[in-house]
């Protein structure tokens, strides 16, 4: 059997605030294989986003082990973490975070012009158009965000996440700001990536979207448990 | 190297995008910085032009830096020695000056004593015991004549004193000496001859006859007194060299640095009992202290104005970073290293600084050209004045320094923005 893409073992994260320390993640174990889709559900404040931050190398766990493609990356310097974020991860957020002064193509290209290697302009443009095409909005490449709907903007954000061909897509409530129908289209676009071998971890409150994932995990008071299919 | 190139290009691309996205802010930063950079450019340009003008004036009157000057009292035997020692040499020139009156015979010149044409040095007054004074008419009545210092040259003195030709031509030392001596006037003498149409007959004390001079050109020699330059051999056709060493004459030798002639000349003069006074022209050194002080004062003022510009760019930079927290957090999320984020902010402020410098230099070049065209004719300092390259360099440096200083703190702040900002948004 090949190594899982992501393996978290005993991940703990304690928030040291002004009052008593609060445990956000309490010995989380999680494995995600290539091409697998996983939904993480839970109440607000249950630690879903914190878990995604740890997986996406935005934040460090206080204890536990984190293996990415068989490599222990529990203690990484920021420089290497930035490199891994660029090469292995794609991020989609609830708010789209598109830069309003840039076109859709330039917003997608942002992930390519990040100081991690240099692509010639022609190659950059080809990859941007390919990513926009994957989410079905190549025809909007020259549009600025203000001239796009919420669903189109989120698909631009997905294209930005996909443009570097990541191994894992991390999506934090990507349909939170969209209506049900548009949200379903966004989930379609995310799931399409898993068919190309990309792992998907989706944090959501929406039961219908969660149900479309391969596995559903419950996070409650920092403890992660797998929901058994009824 | 490849990685550096990628980061450099990335920061430039993103920096330019940032500038394009915030044109008004960039413009406001440029306005606040413009005055500072302009002040530096103007001060540097003014100091360079003033220094060049000052040194050019000093070179005209005193000689080029490094020139050795041998002064000696006027004595007939000294004149003989000087002329014979310097004959045919290019590394030294003797200047022997006497008074000459050009104009009607038997009259007093309009500028008796060789005063500048518009000044009256008051020569020729006779005062009596009862306190009464009246013009001395013993030299004849005042008439159409001008007194000049006639400076005889053994060679081309412009090697040591770079006179600027105003009109006509300079003396030609390669031809046979003419019986009617060729004269090159300085501007003050030319002004006199332009104002008073005097007959061209020249009286020189000790000459065998009155001479008929040929005026061939006008130079600027920096001398306020009317002066005329003549080849020594053309003058000595009518005047013995010993006469050039009589009282009232001036004798000076200009020598190239470290020429052997100096030792030969001073030894020979000392041998006949003539004392010499040797000095070196060091105009720049003598003026350096005051030039440095002048620059320091003006640069301090310009620096203060520049500092205000830096404060402006810093203020706008901090506000911009505050406004772009999400953008920077997102860039970090997609793998942009902290150093590149700092580079993006620095690239923006640097580009703003350089654009401002280019604008300031352009305005100053145009301003100088306009001033030169408008008042260049009445103000010799500004006539055909060129924009000094040092001012351009100073402007670019000021732009870079302002960009780096103004962008440093915002760059640090941008690099420190936590990625989790995008998760909490």
Image: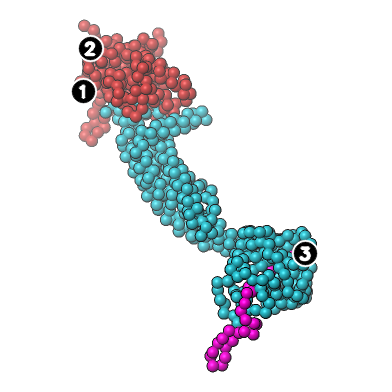
The quarter of the rendered structure image containing the N terminus of chain A is top left
Q: Residue A208 carries which label?
A: 2
Q: Is residue B80 above or below residue A204?
A: below
- Nearer to us in this view, B381 or B393: B381
Q: Nearer the viewer, mark 2 or mark 3?
A: 3
Q: Nearer the viewer, mark 1 or mark 2?
A: 2
The answer to whether the residue labelled 2 contacts the one labelled 3, judged by CB atoms less than 8 Å apart, is no
At 65% from the left and 65% from the top, the residue drawn is: B185
Residue A178 seen in the figure: yes
Magenta-highlighted residues:
B126-154
Colour chain A appears in: red
Secondary structure at numbered mark 1: loop
At 37% from the left and 15% from the top, the residue drawn is: A133
Colour chain B appears in: cyan
Q: Which mark is residue B177?
A: 3
Give the quadrant of residue A215: top left
């Amino acid at each position: 059997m090949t190594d899982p893409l992501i393996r978290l073992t005993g991940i703990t994260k304690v928030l040291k605030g002004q009052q008593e320390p609060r445990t956000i993640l309490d010995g989380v174990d999680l494995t995600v294989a290539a091409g697998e889709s996983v939904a993480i559900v839970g109440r607000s404040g249950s630690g879903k986003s914190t878990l995604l931050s740890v997986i996406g190398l935005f934040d460090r766990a206080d204890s536990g082990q984190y293996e990415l493609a068989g490599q222990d990356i529990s203690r990484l310097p920021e420089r290497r973490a930035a490199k891994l974020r660029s090469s292995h991860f794609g991020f989609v957020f609830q708010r789209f975070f598109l830069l309003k002064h840039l076109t859709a193509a330039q917003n997608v290209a942002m992930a390519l012009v990040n100081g991690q290697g240099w692509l010639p302009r022609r190659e950059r443009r080809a990859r941007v158009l390919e990513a926009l095409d994957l989410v079905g909005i190549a025809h909007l490449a020259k549009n600025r965000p203000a001239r796009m709907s919420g669903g189109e903007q989120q698909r631009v954000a997905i294209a930005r996440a996909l443009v570097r061909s990541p191994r894992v897509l991390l999506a934090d409530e990507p349909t939170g700001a969209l209506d049900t129908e548009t949200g379903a289209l966004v989930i379609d676009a995310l799931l399409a990536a898993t068919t190309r071998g990309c792992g998907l971890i989706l944090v959501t409150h929406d039961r219908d979207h969660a149900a479309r994932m391969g596995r559903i995990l419950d996070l409650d008071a920092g403890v992660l448990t797998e929901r058994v299919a009824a | 190297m490849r990685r550096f190139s990628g980061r450099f290009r990335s920061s430039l691309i993103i920096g330019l995008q940032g500038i394009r996205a915030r044109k008004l802010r960039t413009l406001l930063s440029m306005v606040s910085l413009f005055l500072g950079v302009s002040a530096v450019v103007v001060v540097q340009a003014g100091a360079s032009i003033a220094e060049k003008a000052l040194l050019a004036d000093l070179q005209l009157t005193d000689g080029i830096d490094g020139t050795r000057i041998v002064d000696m009292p006027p004595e007939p035997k000294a004149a003989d020695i000087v002329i014979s020692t310097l004959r045919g040499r290019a590394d030294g020139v003797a200047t022997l000056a006497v008074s000459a009156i050009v104009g009607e015979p038997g009259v007093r010149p309009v500028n008796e004593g060789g005063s500048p044409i518009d000044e009256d040095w008051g020569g020729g007054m006779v005062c009596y015991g009862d306190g009464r004074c009246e013009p001395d008419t013993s030299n004849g009545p005042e008439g159409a004549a001008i007194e000049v210092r006639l400076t005889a040259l053994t060679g081309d003195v412009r090697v040591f004193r770079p006179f600027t030709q105003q009109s006509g031509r300079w003396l030609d030392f390669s031809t046979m000496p003419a019986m009617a001596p060729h004269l090159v006037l300085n501007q003050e003498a030319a002004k006199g001859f332009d104002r008073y149409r005097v007959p061209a007959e020249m009286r020189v004390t000790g000459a065998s006859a009155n001479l008929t001079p040929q005026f061939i050109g006008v130079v600027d020699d920096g001398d306020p007194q009317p002066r005329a330059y003549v080849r020594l051999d053309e003058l000595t056709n009518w005047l013995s060299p010993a006469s050039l060493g009589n009282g009232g004459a001036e004798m000076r030798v200009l020598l190239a640095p470290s020429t052997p002639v100096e030792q030969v000349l001073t030894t020979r003069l000392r041998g006949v009992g003539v004392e010499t006074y040797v000095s070196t022209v060091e105009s720049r050194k003598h003026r350096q202290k005051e030039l440095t002080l002048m620059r320091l004062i003006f640069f301090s003022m310009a620096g203060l104005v520049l500092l205000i510009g830096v404060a402006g760019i810093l203020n706008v930079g901090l506000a911009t970073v505050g406004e772009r927290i999400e953008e920077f957090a997102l860039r970090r999320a997609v793998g942009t290293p902290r150093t590149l984020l700092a580079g993006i902010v620095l690239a923006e402020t640097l580009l703003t600084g350089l654009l401002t410098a280019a604008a300031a230099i352009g305005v100053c070049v145009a301003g100088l050209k306009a001033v030169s065209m408008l008042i260049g004719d009445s103000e010799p300092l500004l006539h055909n004045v060129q924009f000094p390259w040092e001012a351009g360099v100073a402007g670019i440096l000021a732009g870079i320094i302002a960009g780096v200083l103004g962008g440093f703190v915002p760059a640090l702040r941008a690099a420190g923005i936590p990625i989790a900002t995008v998760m909490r948004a």
